[in-house]
Amino acid sequence: MVIFPKAKINIGLRIIKKRPDGFHNLETIFYPVCLCDAIEFVIPQQPLREDILKVTGVLANQNPEHNLVVRAVRKIRETKKIPFLKIHLHKAIPVGAGLGGGSSDAAALLKSLNRYFNLEISNEKLKEISLELGSDCPFFIDGCPSFAESRGELLTPIKPLPKGFYLLLVNPGIYINTREAYSFCTPNQPATDLKNLYNLDISKWKDLIINDFEEFIFMKYPKIAGIKSSLYKMGAVFSSMSGSGSIVYGIFYNKPLIPESIRSMVIYSDPL
């Protein structure tokens, strides 16, 4: 079976407060993007003694034990009996870049195993299982545009943006340590609900929708701040870093002309 887990971008990200469990309460909008990884799993004719994961693409050298795909299979196997699998994961979504690729891979595999083996696990239960793998994993179970609260697992579906916008994803190739990024952010209760800001005309977002990680990350990595500036100079109606970075995206009314200065860093350029 072959599946294609999608990436996401964050439209706004506000850190509300640190929780007793070490996580943070936040509010953000998760928005699906058609940049995909690919996962194939098979049941070999000769039974295996453990799951075998082969990774190609941008994560080819990672230890499989650290991969959320393997952890997702093991989570299913804690309550349901399924055979050991041979899995091939091809990574196209950059790692540590704010696009949720690992979480998307895990959630997509959970859904697919549930369907393939007729496990009859409800979507709500899949979200519970996926939350043990990552705070943004539950979003990828349904994968529709959503306002997210708490750790990111409390999800309220929202209307998608009108058709016709064009999305550009720019990857500076910088790995951001999420724990460090959180440590330099000061939690604060926003004055305006992000859901209300999202419902404004997108031309008003620039000065109102904020990613709290940008202040620290832009200071540490001026290259990332420069990309956002470049996207606005290109005519973006809205630009932001996604999640804790380092991907910067621009939303345009029309297909933009990409200057030489960032052309090699563009990893996705298509209608939103």
Image (spheres, rainbow, N blue to C red):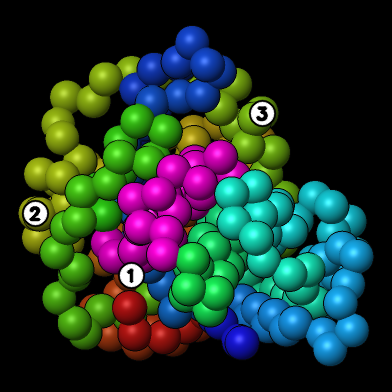
Locate the N terminus by quadrant: bottom right
Query: Residue 251: which disc?
Result: 1
Q: Is residue 28 left or right of residue 195?
A: right
The boundaries of the magenta stretch are 120-145
Q: Earlier in the sequence, mark 3 or mark 2?
A: 3
Residue 34 is at least partly visible in this image: yes
Residue placed farthest to the top in the image? Answer: 20
- Residue at 80% over, 77% down: 86
x then y, percent, for residue 234:
39, 73
Task: Tell me if mark 2 has few (under 14), some (14-19) or many (20+) residues whose alpha carbon lies within 10 angstroms of its own.
Answer: few
Q: Secondary structure at mark 3?
A: helix
Q: How many marks?
A: 3
x then y, percent, for residue 209:
26, 44
Q: Which residue is the site of mark 2?
A: 200
Amino acid bearing label 3: Glu
Residue 226 is at least partly visible in this image: no
Q: Earlier in the sequence, mark 1 or mark 3?
A: 3
Q: Which residue is the site of mark 3?
A: 180
Q: Secondary structure at mark 1?
A: strand
Residue nearest the observer in this picture, 50 or 229: 50
Q: Is residue 69 left or right of residue 157?
A: right
- Residue at 62% over, 70% down: 93
x then y, percent, for residue 247:
56, 59
Amino acid bearing label 1: Ile
> Do the residues bearing badges 2 and 1 touch, measured as CB atoms within 8 Å?
no
